[in-house]
Image: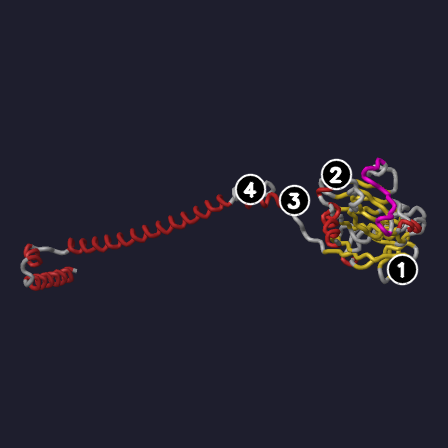
Amino acid sequence: MTLLVLLIIFLLPGCHCTVSTVGDVSVLEGGSVTVPCHYNPQYTSHVKYWCQGRMREFCTSLARTDDPESPPNGKGRVTIADDPTQHVFTVSMRNLTEEDSGWYWCGVELGGMWVSDSTASLHISVIQGVSVVSSLLSADEGSSVTVQCLYSKNLRSIEKQWCRSGNLNSCVVTDSEGTFSSTKVFIHDDRNSMFLVTIHQLEMRDSGWYWCRAGQQQVAVHVSVTAQTTTLSTSTIQNLKTTVRNPSVMSSTDPHSRPVWESFLVVCGIVILVMTGLLALWELWQLCRRMQKHRGTNEMNDNLTMGPWREGDQECVSDFPERCSSGSDALTVELHEGKHQTHRHS
């Protein structure tokens, strides 16, 4: 019998509807909180609600999706909005006080006596003090950075301070108007729940820990300053990308730049000129060799022409080589005699 009851309970529709939400939340007094509640797609058309109480069965309903006073544009402190496309409904609570601390429930109403609603719980703590939106900030050298410091309702009328950690003499304090201004630091207090601290012209030495302070309450913030680097503008980067994609496109910002194909033509022209010069030198060298050969041939012909050929010399050369010696001897004798006669006449 017990097994049958457990099986029936397991098969009930409510057992398959899962609602989930965030974990425990801490909020400064006077601040706001928004909680997302997720549900299964098959329960898109069901009523969603938000209630407060330690036990779900006895919790007090604060907002429902079927209540015209509960939509996001409602004037109450608590509003609810359902987003069927994302399968999530969100609940917002404003101007929280310490009395608002406690257990809350995201619920999907399934209906029926034997079907329990699907719910998820979380604890909201409303505290007094100071907090920051982000405790770790980073900015470039020479730029500015803004710190968002939050405070609770009981600290609205108290002066706000911004201090360098480890040096209480560095604290700057807001005036009666809730502001402080210098060439380096500017503070503005909205007198409700937040004051902004802006540091101008950041330097590397500005890196370190600081305090957002209101009365005796304070919270630490770390500011990191990074060295300034030279960056290219978006248009310059786009031009570079275009040049890489199409090398023939010239940069409009550099009139002296040349496309890749033009540089290639210049190189080819230089190679052709060098080869032409080498070819000309080769032809000149060949011409010089031919001229030397021709000059040697002419000298030989001149010597042969100037010699006193006789009728027997031709025969000597061609048919009777043995006659060459006698003929040459006779020629030598004649030359000597001619010289002696010349000397005598002189």
Report the span colored magenta: 54-68
Residue 42: x and y in percent read 71, 42
Q: Secondary structure at mark 2?
A: loop
The kind of residue on which mark 4 rests is Met
Assign a secondary structure to mark 4: loop
Q: CA distance from mark 3 to mark 4?
A: 18 Å
- Check if mark 3's residue and mark 1's residue have beta carbons within 8 Å: no
Numbered mark located on residue 45 in the image: 2
Q: Nearer the viewer, mark 3 or mark 4?
A: 3
Pointer 4 with pointer 2, Cβ within 8 A: no
278 to the left or right of 266: left
Q: Nearer the viewer, mark 1 or mark 4?
A: 1
Q: Is residue 172 visible?
A: no
Give x and y (percent) for residue 241.
58, 45
Of residues 152 and 173, the one nearer the viewer is: 152
| Mark 3 surroundings within 10 Å by alpha-carbon count, few (fewer than 14), some (14 through 19), many (20 or more) | few
Residue under pointer 1: 169
Label of residue 250 in the image: 4
Pair 3/2: label in front = 2
Q: Amino acid at mark 3?
A: Thr
